[in-house]
Image (cartoon, rainbow, N blue to C red):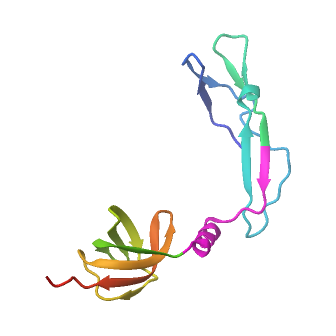
Amino acid sequence: MNVVEVSGETTDNVSYTAEVPSGELKIVRPFNVGAGKVTVLTLDFDGEKSLVRTGKSGKFLFKPVVKLAIDYEAKTEQEQEQEQEQGAEELDFVGTIDAINGNIWTMTIEGESRTVDVSEAEIKGEPAAGLQAEVKGTVVDNTIIASEVEIKEPEEG
């Protein structure tokens, strides 16, 4: 890997740029990336050992001391999302529809504005802003992924 720049700040708030003698970071531990697989490399720099102050005032050399961890069992983002959705427990929510933008709704549920994705949901009734809805679904990345939605008709008064 090419190292473009190493910069930092001393404990007494003096900024510096360190010279990288070779201009690159060499990984000497072998690893394989299988076809269609994800391999995650985690580089852990030891800052105290990697940064060397030279005899010249204010000059630093960066000679990286790195620990390499290799995860051959890493999952793609899509696999992680599928696992989250499969492992998530379905919950029931009741709230008011604030806005409808295609399959993405904004609802107020327990006094909090929430995003609801209804793209895969079975919807009973005619949704409209201002109406109450019961939503059954899972929460993924702070979005409710609805499986069922029932629109409540306004009560006559």
Q: Is residue 74 magenta?
A: yes
What residue span does the magenta drawing correspond to?
Answer: 68-89
* Residue found 61% across the figure and 75% down from its top: 86
Q: Nearer the viewer, residue 25 or 155?
A: 155
The percent coordinates of residue 153 (x first, y second) are: 25, 85
* Residue found 62% across the figure and 33% down from its top: 5
The percent coordinates of residue 130 (x first, y second) are: 23, 74
The percent coordinates of residue 102 (x first, y second) are: 34, 77
Q: Is residue 120 magenta?
A: no
Q: Quadrant of residue 133?
A: bottom left
* Residue found 47% across the figure and 63% down from its top: 142
Relative placement, left or right, of 10 versus 114 is right
Q: The N terminus is located in which quarter? A: top right
Q: Residue furthest left?
A: 157
* Residue found 69% across the figure and 11% down from its top: 56
Q: Quadrant of residue 106?
A: bottom left
How many numbered discs sit on the rendered protein?
A: 0
Q: Nearer the viewer, residue 157 or 53?
A: 157
Q: Nearer the viewer, residue 35 or 45?
A: 45
Q: Is residue 71 above or below residue 75?
A: above
Q: The C terminus is located in which quarter? A: bottom left
Q: Residue furthest front?
A: 157
The percent coordinates of residue 22 (x first, y second) are: 75, 32
Q: Quadrant of residue 117?
A: bottom left
